Image: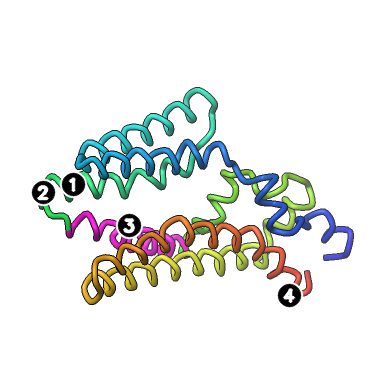
């Protein structure tokens, strides 16, 4: 690929990409608000009601975004599984230990999903990037998308997401079993939104770095 082609597909630094292209409104509606709803009600001793309202909010955001605006709120979709796990666990087990384990279960399920998607023609992170509009639409980019180098970058990136979620699940399981509750809660918090923020930052930066590294 010549230099002009490279310019056509090049991206600004990841922090500029995040600031300009990251769907902050969708993130707040689909991820932040459900988390706030759940934890506020959990603080008041109503975890089941909090999980039900948070899950209902997520489903509502998904439906309105799709049918009214013709788009997909991926953050709402991502937030629904963990709230459903919390609802099922609370109803069936009535155990606070199960609630504490939901973060590990959620990480484990997403890690497996990312691994399985490596066998697809379009791995999961590529699908998410396309849905977020993070890949430029141009004739040159369309040609580049057909190359094995384009797909390999997303395979590596999807593997990173899979490994991070599986490692997070292992860490959460071990700390819940072996460490004091206070330490476990700190680790659980650190591996929630901060981990997602790091993975998103890597996702904006990695493809261009990877293609530059292999000389494209």
Q: Is residue 97 left or right of residue 74?
A: left
Q: Earlier in the sequence, mark 4 or mark 2?
A: 2
Q: Secondary structure at mark 3?
A: helix
| Residue designated by label 1 | 88
Q: Earlier in the sequence, mark 3 or mark 1?
A: 1
Q: Could you say where residue 75 lies in the image, as x and y percent from the top left?
A: 46, 44
Per the rendering, the mark at residue 102 is: none
Per the rendering, the mark at residue 92 is: 2
Distance (Cα) linking label 3 and label 4: 34 Å
Q: Nearer the viewer, residue 103 or 120?
A: 103
Residue occupying image coordinates x 75% and y 52%: 141
Q: Could you say where residue 30 lies in the image, as x and y percent from the top left?
A: 45, 39
Distance (Cα) linking label 3 and label 1: 13 Å
Q: Looking at the image, which residue sits at the far left?
A: 93
Per the rendering, the mark at residue 106 is: 3
| Residue designated by label 4 | 213
Residue occupying image coordinates x 27% and y 56%: 102
């Amino acid at each position: 690929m010549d230099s002009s082609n490279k310019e056509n597909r090049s991206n600004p630094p990841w922090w500029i990409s995040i600031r300009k292209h990251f769907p902050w409104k969708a993130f707040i509606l689909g991820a932040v608000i459900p988390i706030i709803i759940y934890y506020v009600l959990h603080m008041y001793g109503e975890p089941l009601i909090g999980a039900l309202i948070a899950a209902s909010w997520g489903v509502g955001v998904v439906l309105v975004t799709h049918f009214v605006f013709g788009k997909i709120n991926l953050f709402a979709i991502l937030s629904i599984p963990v709230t459903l796990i919390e609802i099922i666990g609370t109803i069936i087990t009535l155990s606070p230990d199960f609630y504490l384990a939901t973060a590990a279960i959620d990480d484990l399920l997403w890690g497996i999903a990312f691994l399985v998607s490596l066998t697809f023609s379009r791995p999961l992170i590529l699908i998410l990037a396309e849905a977020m509009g993070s890949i430029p639409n141009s004739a040159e980019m369309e040609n580049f998308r057909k190359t094995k180098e384009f797909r390999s970058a997303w395979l590596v990136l999807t593997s990173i997401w899979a490994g991070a979620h599986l490692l997070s699940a292992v860490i959460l399981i071990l700390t819940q079993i072996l460490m004091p509750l206070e330490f476990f809660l700190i680790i659980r918090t650190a591996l929630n939104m901060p981990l997602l923020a790091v993975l998103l930052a890597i996702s904006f930066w990695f493809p261009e770095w990877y293609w530059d590294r292999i000389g494209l």
